[in-house]
Image (cartoon, rainbow, N blue to C red):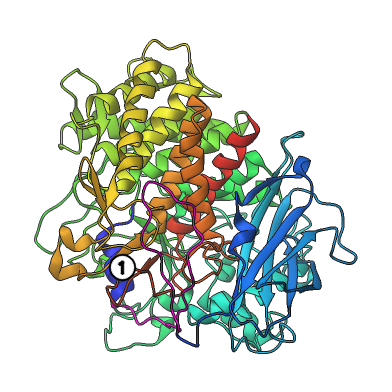
């Protein structure tokens, strides 16, 4: 889950923030409708594409052409320029006439030279300017539409320049790679976009083919470790054993506020003095996203299998294998107990492990590793997903061994330290409901391919461990149906229980798992938001402080830290899309699917800015907020992050898959 370390670091970090524009909301009316909002600031966009996202951003090829429609605010505008760019980076344009303030066109029918509609992602742009090369002085509109084939169950893969290695199956890199044309087109599309301009990073002159701009992309946007890509990975670099490696943030983020100086001199502020790293949990998140893509989609990246295999090798390398305790005394002299099976806090790009006093933990106030940490649950989830993707062969054997070690620590050995617990009904669980839910998701996925693997001493099989893990979550449910006030906790528990009930439908306890998940989800769906706090439709989830109310104001928990304004965290939205997709498939209750699709719609352009928040790079911004406290989100900033990116895309892949089941 997103922890205070991530929130506070991004709040303290200097952000490049652009101006923001708001239009009349076209969001579906879900759970509660605010008063709506209309602004007259001349900087706000004159064009709106949100009608294109109704009734859903998920379109089946069986239903015919994609209708692109929208509105303009100025009666003197008689035509708009429309452009559709596919997930392969190929663009098609046409002009559409405006009648009574509205316009529409059909894709691909009305777009010259466009091919037949096929599964993929469509990035739609509209402008009232003469062309897209001119600055959007009156604003542009953006939308994203997912196209799948319900007949063949072919799902689209989302472009992922944010995490790509720019390598192909033949080992050719960058401009020589078969990924280059699409990456070039989509990165340039993003950097020239209205959304990027609002987020403070847009550059109308940017061209990835320019060496200077390519360097900027690698240092200021991308998560992949290009610096280690060219090494001959026959042998390990310290503890790093494979090529594929995603940093937690882009290179230039690492500085004296979040890293230790390599030369030991804190006054040396050069970027080269701070070595990039990945938190184990962030690395696991991106790996799970790629494993989900590999398993479910028509893959856009030809070497995705290699990336997944190499990523799993590096994740496994982060696991401690000795009976010794790898933790060091912290600044207060306290020492945690992390023995065989526990995962290290993180890894630097050179293969060094992160420890107390290094990297993020150079600051003694940052203690994400404490009391069991936030690392092991997500690492085990990734192992379960990895085993499901690669159920046989040498890698499967390594994953099974790593999974068994991790479970031994999290469910057995950590009982002695108080990191793990036993419910009143005798079921073991890791740390708390939210962290245990990650672990349970790993077990559910592993059980689908290796239910009889003996993963706990003296001979307990994965299937029985999984059943106990899911029962523990039911045991922990509070009388009001919640597990916590935090939406990320409850959504992950719901996801685990729903997936467990789908995977083990004949298990006697599966009805209890389903009932607990539905009860909690129904409470969140009907919770009301105070109109004095939040004016827009309550699509996303925030804090559920009472059984009947929800808020986006974290100041209810800590007024000094958060201020009197709203925050929407997209890693939480990703969790909920995932959870509701599972419930929709399990129950056939369309309320769950509608709410999930409303959140996806917001990410795709149905938001106060009318721009893509899940953007052409395949990245998702960390959060948005209401800086002026008027109840409407108004600040968008370039802070794409592994958690928001991975969880939103994992959720969307599950949602697309549920529509074809």
Q: Is 463 one of the magenta-colored residues?
A: no
Q: Residue at x 77, y 40 (%)?
A: 62
In the image, farthest residue toward the left: 332
Asked whether, in this view, residue 307 is left or right of residue 11, the answer is right
Depth check: give the residue in front, 157 or 119: 119
Characterize the local packing of mark 1: few (<14), some (14-19) or many (20 or more) Cα atoms within 10 angstroms. Answer: many
**Is residue 314 shown to the viewer in this render?**
no
In the image, residue 34 lies in the stretch drawn in magenta: yes
Q: Nearer the viewer, residue 661 or 238?
A: 661
| Labels in figure, total | 1
Picture quadrant of residue 81: bottom right
Q: Name the one closer to the observer, 480 or 285.
A: 480
Query: Residues in magenta?
Result: 12-40
Q: Is residue 563 above or below residue 268?
A: above
Residue 576 placement, left or right of 173: left
Dot 1 lies on which element? Answer: loop
Between 415 and 532, the residue placed more toward the observer is: 532
Quarter holding residue 170: bottom right
Say whether residue 435 is visible: yes
Outermost residue to the right: 113
Residue 443 coordinates in the image, percent (x, y): 43, 29
Circle 1 residue: 631
Residue 301 location in percent, x, y? 70, 54
Residue 660 at what x, y percent from top left? 65, 33
Q: Main secondary structure of the magenta part?
A: loop
Is residue 188 positioned above or below 514 on the image? below
Quarter of the figure with the C terminus: top right
Q: Residue shown at 56%/24% (left/top)?
A: 449
Q: Residue furthest front?
A: 100
Q: Residue 72: x and y, percent? A: 62, 75
Q: Choose top left, top right, bottom left or bottom right for residue 459.
A: top left
């Amino acid at each position: 889950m997103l922890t205070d370390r991530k929130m506070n670091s991004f709040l303290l970090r200097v952000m490049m923030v652009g101006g923001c524009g708001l239009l009349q909301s076209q969001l579906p009316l879900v759970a509660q409708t605010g008063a709506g909002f209309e602004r007259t600031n001349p900087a706000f966009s004159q064009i709106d594409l949100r009608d294109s996202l109704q009734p859903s951003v998920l379109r089946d090829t069986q239903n015919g052409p994609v209708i692109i429609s929208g509105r303009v605010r100025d009666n003197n505008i008689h035509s708009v320029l429309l452009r559709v760019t596919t997930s392969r980076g190929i663009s098609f344009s046409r002009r559409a006439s405006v009648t009574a303030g509205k316009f529409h066109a059909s894709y691909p029918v009305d777009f010259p030279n466009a091919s037949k509609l096929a599964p993929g992602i469509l990035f739609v742009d509209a402008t009232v300017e003469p062309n897209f090369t001119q600055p959007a002085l009156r604003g542009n509109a953006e939308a994203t539409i997912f196209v799948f084939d319900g007949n063949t169950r072919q799902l689209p893969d989302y472009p992922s320049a944010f995490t790509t290695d720019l390598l192909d199956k033949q080992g050719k890199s960058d401009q020589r790679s078969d990924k280059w044309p699409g990456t070039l087109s989509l990165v340039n599309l993003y950097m020239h976009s209205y959304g990027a301009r609002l987020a403070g990073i847009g550059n109308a002159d940017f061209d990835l083919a320019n060496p200077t701009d390519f360097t900027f992309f690698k240092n200021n946007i991308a998560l992949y470790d290009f610096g280690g890509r060219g090494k001959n990975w026959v042998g390990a670099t310290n503890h790093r054993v494979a090529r594929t490696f995603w940093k937690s943030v882009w290179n230039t983020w690492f500085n004296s506020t979040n890293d230790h100086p390599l030369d030991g001199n804190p006054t040396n502020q050069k970027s080269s003095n701070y070595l990039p790293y990945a938190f184990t949990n962030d690395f696991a998140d991106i790996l799970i996203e790629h494993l989900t893509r590999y398993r479910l989609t028509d893959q856009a990246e030809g070497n995705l299998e290699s990336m997944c295999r190499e990523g799993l090798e590096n994740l496994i390398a982060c696991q401690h294998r000795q009976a010794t305790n790898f933790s060091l005394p912290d600044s207060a002299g306290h020492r945690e107990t992390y023995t065989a099976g526990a995962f290290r806090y993180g890894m630097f790009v050179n293969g060094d492990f992160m420890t107390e006093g290094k990297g993020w933990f150079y600051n003694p106030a940052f203690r994400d590793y404490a009391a069991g940490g936030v690392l092991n649950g997500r690492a085990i989830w990734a192992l379960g997903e990895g085993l499901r993707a690669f159920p046989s062969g040498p890698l499967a054997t390594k994953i099974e061994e790593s999974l068994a070690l991790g479970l031994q620590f999290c469910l057995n050995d950590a009982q002695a330290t108080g990191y793990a617990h036993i419910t009143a009904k005798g079921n073991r669980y890791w740390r708390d409901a939210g962290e245990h839910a990650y672990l349970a998701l790993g077990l559910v996925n592993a059980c689908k391919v290796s239910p009889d693997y003996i993963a706990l001493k003296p001979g307990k099989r994965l299937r029985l461990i999984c059943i106990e893990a899911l029962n523990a979550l039911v045991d922990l449910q509070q009388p009001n149906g919640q597990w916590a006030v935090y939406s990320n906790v409850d959504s992950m528990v719901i996801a685990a229980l729903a997936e467990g009930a789908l995977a083990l439908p004949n298990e006697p306890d599966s009805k209890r798992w389903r009932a607990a998940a539905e009860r909690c989800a129904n409470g969140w769906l009907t919770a009301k938001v105070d109109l004095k706090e939040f004016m827009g439709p309550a699509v996303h989830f925030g804090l559920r402080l009472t059984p009947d109310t929800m808020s986006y104001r974290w100041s209810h928990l800590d007024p000094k830290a958060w201020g009197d304004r709203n925050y929407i965290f997209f890693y939480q939205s990703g969790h909920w899309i995932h959870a509701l997709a599972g419930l929709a498939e399990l129950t056939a209750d369309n309320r769950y699917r509608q709410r999930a699709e409303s959140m996806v719609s917001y990410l795709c352009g149905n938001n106060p800015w009318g721009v893509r928040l899940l953007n052409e790079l395949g990245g998702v911004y960390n959060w948005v907020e209401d800086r002026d406290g008027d109840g409407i989100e108004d600040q968008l900033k370039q802070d794409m992050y592994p958690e928001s990116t991975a969880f939103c895309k994992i959720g969307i892949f599950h949602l697309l898959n549920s529509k074809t089941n």
